[in-house]
Image (tube, helix red, strand yellow):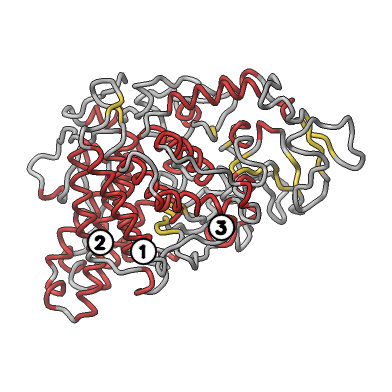
């Protein structure tokens, strides 16, 4: 499995292959290992490609910054918050109070370009290997797979750059082959179109999931789902140099790509389908370092424990480990209370996505105030094997694409292309919703049959399904709804604080059973609290909400500005051809 990361021993020796533009990527690898030797055998080529995968992981990748900091604040959850703001770091990032010198910008930017440079070298060298054309069938099959994998990885790196920074410098060949390393920005639509063509090629090079050993590498389902996602973003809104949110006139052409790719995947349920249990996707698979047997997780970033991932430490409930008296974890991704109350009371996804407790040393639960509820899909008490060290790196993988996203992308594209939901779109939408209401399907409610009504339902459903997975903010941007939803969540938050309808019956206090390994409440989450509950501990619920908590949500967000990040100042300083746009 990639998680073992043993390839790094070899990759360190071959770091010289992966040089980049030092002027703005600040990479200075040193090695005397020969490049020809690196691409002389399948096993060495595989090591080089696994080194490309490596650039997805770690603190500056999806182990922390790209997964737990960049996606917040939104209308579901908010990022780290305390009295140390402004800090020109993570707190300002969450509040949209961004300067180009923010401490959290440069290293992720550099790492994404490092991944691109590594991929560019492999994309050039692997098809040029003699074994690519003249090796054994086994060798040719593996090299073609590796070629498809690096095309896909490069697409993911560029996608992350585009959705955070908009137009960026783009090179599709190794830096060593470039006449001029000082590149200006490339229009994001040109980059998207190149990547969509690359992914079409990659589809023919990589195998289906069941045709190879089960691991965390890219397969055909990954490529098709990623191509569908990129096409949906290419057809969506984004902030342009005009200072306005715009979408291209031919956006429906890209929705058609999304629809067709998703349709192909829906015909291959032998490869990918929904896990019957939403909880098991996280507790039973991702948090347990296990491969999902249903193939629901089409693409995940492989992490190594004690190295790569702060999932479950930076976010999720705080915790203790044996022999350590300190309360560990940050609990830094908090659930906005009105998001918790947007779920139906019988929607099983609510109590997977939202964790209202901290863990005690004996793993019993201490319920927190409503404003201190944390994200819950990656939580310490679900990690298997259990954490035994106070080190922050948990090794939990980051899911990039799940099959439920394929179903909902298909439904969205069908609705847009047909001016309303088709029977197939309705079926795909309801398949996702039905799992959330498993055992209470009769309470799902009727699916809207008009275009706007169905779209509005999709906007909500994607929130219920993907909360805490780093998707919501970017969904709202491509729909041009981020500003609207931030305003709505603050308005509803105010109503909740003031106990106004529809929140007038939500309790001010909750009573929970102390010492229990599960959260056991004495009173309802949806009715006024009793004056007392003998044997239970009282905790402030809506009573904990203050005006400052409401103000805190995306506090300094500005429409037609904050949808994108500023280019790191060190990059601007190093390359005079890169401009700082969008009002930064």
Write down the residue under mark 1.
267
Q: For mark 1, does the 10 Å Cα neighbourhood hold few (<14), some (14 to 19), or many (20 or more) residues?
A: few
Quarter of the figure that contains the N terminus: bottom left
Q: Which residue corresponds to the image point at 33% horizontal and 42% vertical from the top-left?
A: 160
**Disc with the residue nearer the chain's start (1 vs 3):** 1
Mark 1, secondary structure of its residue: loop
Q: For mark 2, does the 10 Å Cα neighbourhood hold few (<14), some (14 to 19), or many (20 or more) residues?
A: many
Please state which of residues 327 and 438 is positioned toward the viewer in this rendering: 438
When asked about the image quadrant of residue 248, the answer is top left
Q: Residue furthest right?
A: 534
Please state which of residues 373 and 60 is positioned toward the viewer in this rendering: 373
Write down the residue under mark 2.
203
Residue 87 versus residue 456 in the image, above or below: above
Quarter of the figure that contains the C terminus: top left
Write down the residue under mark 3.
287
Q: Which residue corresponds to the image point at 27% horizontal and 62% vertical from the top-left?
A: 48
Residue 318 x, y percent position in the rendering: 65, 44
The answer to whether residue 397 is left or right of residue 112 is right
């Amino acid at each position: 499995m990639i998680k073992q990361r043993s390839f790094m021993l070899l990759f360190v020796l071959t770091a010289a292959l992966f040089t980049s533009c030092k002027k703005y990527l600040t990479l200075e690898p040193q090695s005397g290992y020969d490049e020809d030797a690196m691409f002389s055998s399948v096993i060495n080529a595989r090591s080089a490609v696994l080194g490309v995968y490596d650039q997805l992981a770690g603190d500056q990748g999806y182990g922390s910054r790209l997964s737990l900091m960049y996606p917040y604040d939104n209308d579901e959850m908010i990022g780290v918050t305390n009295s140390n703001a402004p800090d020109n770091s993570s707190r300002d990032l969450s509040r949209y109070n961004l300067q180009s010198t923010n401490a959290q910008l440069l290293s992720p930017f550099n790492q994404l370009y490092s991944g691109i440079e590594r991929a560019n070298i492999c994309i050039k060298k692997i098809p040029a290997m003699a074994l690519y054309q003249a090796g054994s069938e086994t060798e040719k099959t593996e090299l073609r797979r590796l070629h498809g994998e690096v095309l896909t990885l490069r697409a993911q790196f560029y996608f992350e750059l585009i959705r955070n920074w908009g137009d960026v410098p783009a090179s599709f060949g190794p830096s060593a082959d470039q006449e001029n390393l000082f590149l200006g920005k490339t229009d994001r639509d040109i980059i998207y179109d190149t990547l969509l063509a690359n992914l079409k090629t990659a589809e023919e090079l990589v195998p289906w999931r069941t045709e190879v050993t089960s691991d965390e590498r890219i397969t055909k389902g990954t490529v098709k789902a990623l191509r569908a996602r990129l096409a949906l973003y290419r057809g969506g809104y984004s902030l342009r140099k005009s200072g306005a949110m715009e979408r291209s006139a031919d956006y429906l052409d890209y929705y058609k790509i999304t629809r067709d790719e998703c349709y192909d995947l829906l015909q291959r349920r032998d490869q990918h389908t929904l896990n019957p249990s939403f909880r098991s996707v996280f507790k039973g698979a991702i948090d347990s370092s296990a491969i999902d047997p249903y193939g629901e997780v089409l693409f995940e970033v492989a992490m190594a424990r004690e190295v790569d991932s702060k999932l479950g430490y930076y976010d999720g409930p705080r915790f203790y480990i044996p022999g350590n008296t300190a309360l560990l974890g940050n609990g830094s991704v908090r659930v906005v209370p009105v998001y918790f109350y947007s779920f139906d009371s019988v929607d099983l996804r609510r109590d997977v996505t939202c964790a209202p407790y901290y863990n005690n040393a004996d793993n019993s639960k201490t319920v927190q105030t409503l404003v201190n509820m944390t994200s819950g899909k990656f939580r310490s008490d679900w990690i298997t094997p259990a954490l035994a060290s106070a080190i922050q790196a948990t090794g939990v993988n980051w899911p990039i694409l799940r099959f439920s996203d394929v179903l909902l992308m298909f439904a969205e594209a069908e609705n847009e292309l047909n001016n309303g939901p088709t029977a197939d779109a309705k079926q795909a939408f309801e398949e996702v919703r039905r799992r959330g209401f498993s055992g209470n399907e009769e309470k799902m409610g009727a699916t809207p049959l008009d275009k706007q009504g169905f779209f509005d339902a999709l906007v909500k459903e994607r929130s219920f399904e993907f909360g805490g997975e780093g998707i919501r903010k970017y969904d709202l941007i491509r729909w041009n709804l981020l500003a609207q939803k931030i305003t709505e969540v603050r308005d509803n938050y105010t109503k909740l604080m003031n106990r106004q309808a529809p929140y007038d019956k939500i309790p001010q206090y909750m009573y929970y059973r102390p010492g229990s390994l599960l959260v056991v409440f004495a009173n309802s989450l949806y009715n006024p609290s009793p004056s007392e509950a003998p044997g239970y501990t009282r905790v402030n619920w809506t009573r904990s909400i203050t005006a400052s908590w409401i103000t805190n949500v995306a506090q300094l967000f500005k429409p037609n500005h904050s949808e994108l990040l500023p280019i790191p100042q060190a990059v601007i300083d190093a390359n005079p051809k890169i401009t700082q746009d969008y009002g930064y």
